[in-house]
Image: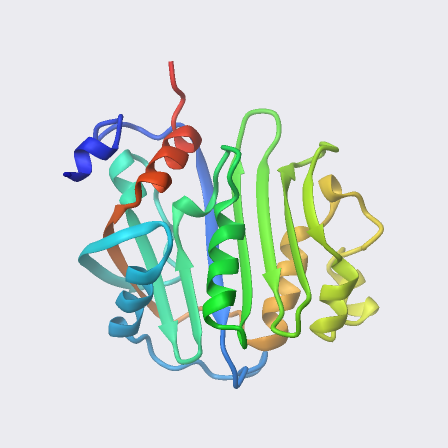
Amino acid sequence: MSDETLWDFPSDETVERHGEFALTVVRPPFPGPDGVLAAHDEARARAFAEEFGTVDRVLDHRETIPVTELIEVDTRADLEVIRVGCWGGVTQINDPALISLSERFPIEEQAEALADRHPDAVIVAAAEMDLPGADYGTWKIVHPGGARVFAAGFSGEEDWDVVGEVTAVLDAFGITPEQAAAVGVDPAHAPGSFAWDALAGLALKAVSPTDRRGLMASAFRVRRTEDAVVAMEDTWFERD
């Protein structure tokens, strides 16, 4: 079956929405916030991409680019491109399939799958999409000690999906109340107004440097799984 038969939209179809999406795996020994990350390993990046749950197979390596370069998702063809950086024990994937407006939560599914494969790892994932009226976001944080939190919903609204305890995550990562308050993280806030991005940033910074300037990553064109295609079409395009 060709790639074209999986999609209802042609490769040059313009996407209707825009977003940001990243999942990071940090394996021990954790470098900590002041650590130095190794140079990008392209072979390991390809192996990670090939095993990622939204990918059926890697079709080709497009280019090696700075990981800080803006990811442009303008057409359906761009939805078939992922970026993976492997810097020693830290791996980051930017994949538009991580966000979904369907009933599934791919960020939760992929983080849990990685946690099963790497039970000693910290996993921090965040994906957000700009929508008319209310932005949508979804986050997942996994600590190898067992603390987890997952959240998904529309900003400012009350109907959120939340699993896990923020306080358990703060304790697991050794984040003090003062550190949390400094970036606006308050466990008493309702999910729709909670600073989920700030919490994810605190968790990631506790185990690795978060300044990615100067680091490179590999961009791959991939064939999607059928499930990923269905969810991405419902998410990135307006159907008639």
For the C terminus, which image quadrant? top left
Residue at far left of view: 2
Q: Residue at x 80, y 61 (%)?
A: 181
* In the depicted structure, whether residue 215 falls above or below residue 53: below
Q: Position of residue 86 (x, y in %)?
A: 36, 72
* In the depicted structure, whether residue 101 falls above or below residue 228: above
Does residue 44 appear to the left or right of 169 in the view shown? Answer: left
Does residue 177 appear to the left or right of 220 in the view shown? Answer: right
Residue at far front of view: 116
* In the depicted structure, whether residue 176 falls above or below residue 124: below
Q: Position of residue 102 (x, y in %)?
A: 49, 32
Q: Nearer the viewer, residue 161 or 94?
A: 161
Q: Residue at x 82, y 68 (%)?
A: 178
Colour pattern: rainbow
Q: Quadrant of residue 64?
A: bottom left
Could one spot residue 37 in this view of the protein?
yes
Could one spot residue 11 in this view of the protein?
no
Does residue 213 appear to the left or right of 139 in the view shown? Answer: left
Q: Quadrant of residue 155?
A: top right
Q: Nearer the viewer, residue 234 or 201?
A: 234
Q: Position of residue 199 (x, y in %)?
A: 68, 59
Residue at far top of view: 240
Q: Nearer the viewer, residue 64 or 161?
A: 161
For the N terminus, which image quadrant? top left
Q: Position of residue 51 (x, y in %)?
A: 33, 62
Task: Please tell me how many numbered marks the rendered image carries.
Answer: 0
Q: Quadrant of residue 212?
A: bottom left
Q: Residue at x 40, y 80 (%)?
A: 88
Q: Nearer the viewer, residue 107 or 22?
A: 107
Q: Residue at x 77, y 71 (%)?
A: 171
